[in-house]
Amino acid sequence: MRHIDLLRESVRVVRAAHPFIIHAWVVLPEHLHCIIELPIGDADFALRWRLIKSHFSKSLPKTELLSATRLRRGERGIWQRRFWEHLIRDDKDFSAHMDYVHINPLKHGLVTSVDKWPYSTFHRLMEQGVYPVNWAGGDENDVRHFD
């Protein structure tokens, strides 16, 4: 998580030029998950991800080993080429995805309770009363969903 501040800055820069609302975000050692909402009439998730990845990558020194394919394409070895996009269907789907994003540090064995992972919007949502402090405290049966 050495470059978390650079990732935050990259997101801030892109949001200033191409707005979006962050509903949920968690950064893990090898990947991240998020739920973002674009302005009405704007469905260009790909633009935002390309710009975030580009800003982040250009700010790091080139120290990673690159495959011949990445060298030929002028790509860095930091990001995977694609991302998964899912359009939220309804409130139940939103709740399930919010929980999925926030449970990931626990699911991957990085912490024993969700509130121990610092790189997550869980803390902000907990302060707003969306999640209780002890949500997903290591007992997956204790996971509470949004209503």
Image (tube, rainbow, N blue to C red):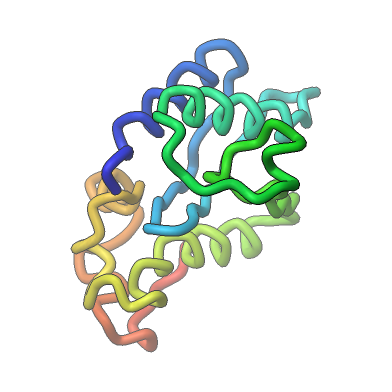
Residue 18, percent from left and from top: 62, 17
Q: Is 96 on the left-hand or right-hand side of 44? A: left
Give the residue drawn at x 49%, y 56%: 31
Residue 143, by quadrant, is bottom left
Closer-to-camera residue (90/54): 54
Give the residue drawn at x 29%, y 71%: 110
Give the residue drawn at x 75%, y 47%: 69
Q: Is residue 88 above or below residue 9?
A: below
Q: Is 103 on the left-hand or right-hand side of 119? A: right
Q: Is 127 on the left-hand or right-hand side of 82? A: left
Residue 41, by quadrant, is top right
Closer-to-camera residue (26/129): 26
Closer-to-camera residue (73/9): 73
Count of marks overlaid on the render: 0
Residue 52, percent from left and from top: 55, 29
Q: Is residue 55 above or below residue 3?
A: above
